[in-house]
Amino acid sequence: MLTLQHPKQKQVLLIALPMIASNLTIPLLSLVDTAVVGHLAQAWYLGGVALGSSLISLVFLLLGFLRMSTTGLTAQALGRNNQQALRQSLLQAGLVAICLALILLIVHPWVMPIVYKLSSASTEVLTQAEIYFQIRIWSAPAALLNMVLLGWFLGLQNARYPMWLLLLNQTINILLDLLFVLGFDWKVSGVAAASVLADYSTLAVGLYLVRRLWRQQQLGPVKWPQLFSADGYSRLFALNRDIFIRSLCLQLVFVFIAFRGASFGDTVVAANAVLITFLMLVSYALDGFAYAAEALTGKAVGAKDQSELRLLLKILAGWGWLLGGLFSALFWLAGSTIISSLTSITAVQQQANLYLPWLIGLPLLAVWGYLLDGIYIGATQARAMRNSMLLAFSGFALCYLLLQHLNNHALWLALSLFMLLRGLSLAWPLYRQGIVVLFR
């Protein structure tokens, strides 16, 4: 890893550090959700929030291609100094986001009946999950448009605006969480309502920041014929298709863990929810550097600068080893203490401590998939990401199928293999073909 004084290192940190600071508030929200619900009288409240939020994650994060493709296309347009493409990347992605949100609102009444048929969770857990989902889904328009805005800001190398928006979102969410659950005793409904209000508040501020940045970049008036023309949509849809498949596999893994864990009892599904919070903490910290990789890779690819990209890879590798090691050490030394702070239910604490050793090794396995995802997103090499995720997902499914007699341990073993395969399959093309593979 190059010294912190190196210019490229400063570029990485200028984007990564604000995003890490803001991203860490996202698992902080999960910690607050888990803590306020985990201290209610029954474990099914915690299980219901875990299951309901997993469903929302599956629905919203499946559409995470809106942010990813916007970042890659915007960064490459910046590298080419193409103002028309900069306008197009925001407006076309925004239109797609609105259409997808409307579809979600139309079809959402049919989601929970399917969940009731597929899940073996207890009736109490499913009831609480339905309460959460039916409220939370109404934030779809704001949540999807916020993804587009974050992607556009990052593509323009602006990490301050995403940081402000994420901090605003999580602050409002946490405050309303505490007010609605602890103050008004709305239980699971309060957790969901807090998220909805936070998303719309963030969108309002985000649109104001778009206006400011639009003027700073001197992008000029919106040319509506370009917005509705087919030009640009073909590449956007091709990228979105492959990233959608990649995101689907990723979310199915975590949803399967939530659903399958529920079949082992309310205590196990609650314990898994606590431990997944640990992993989310890792992922959001690493995503700060992944966001930097997206923005800087896209600009380098747009400018056709291979030497910049090689240097970026070297810097990211150093940070990957450092962060992975730090999180593994944290979970080894303080994991039990963190679990106790998240839930006061003794049975859940015991189950979470039983599976804690799996979390100690996961950061070092997971780091490469997160960082290399950022490289491939910036290069808009979505097909390679799709193929990598399909391989990792197949490994996860096969591992669990063969070792399911190990019950919940099989889930965590399969997740560890999934993370390993994800990183290796993304690194392999770079090892065999070199950095040139990202410029094709």
Image: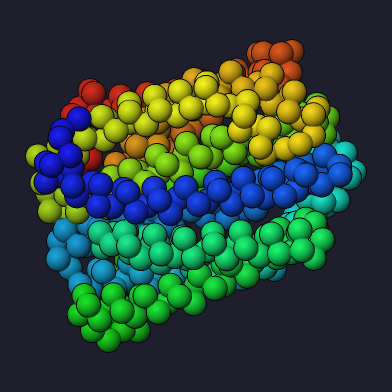
Residue at left 17%, top 68%? 82
Residue 15 position within the rendered picture, expressed as x and y whole percent measured from the top left: 28, 52
Image quarter in which the C terminus is found: top left
Q: Residue 335 sits in which quadrant?
A: top right
Q: Residue 171 sits in which quadrant?
A: bottom right
Q: Nearer the viewer, residue 40 or 282?
A: 40
**Residue at the extreme bottom of the image, as rendered:** 221
Viewed as shown, does residue 294 lie left or right of 54? Answer: left
Residue 97 position within the rendered picture, expressed as x and y whole percent measured from the top left: 50, 67
Q: Nearer the viewer, residue 114 or 172?
A: 172
Report the coloring of the rendering: rainbow
Work out whether 204 lies above or below 49. Answer: below
Residue at left 23%, top 46%? 12
Q: How many circles with numbers are drawn on the protein?
A: 0
Residue at left 33%, top 36%? 372
Viewed as shown, does residue 275 lie left or right of 85? Answer: right
Image quarter in which the N terminus is found: top left
Residue at left 50%, top 70%? 202
Work out whether 366 lies above or below 66. Answer: above
Residue 353 position within the rendered picture, expressed as x and y whole percent measured from the top left: 67, 22
Q: Nearer the viewer, residue 139 or 89?
A: 139
**Residue at the extreme right of the image, as rendered:** 123
Residue 297 position within the rendered picture, expressed as x and y whole percent measured from the top left: 23, 47
Viewed as shown, does residue 218 lie left or right of 71? Answer: left
Work out whether 307 lies above or below 429. Answer: below
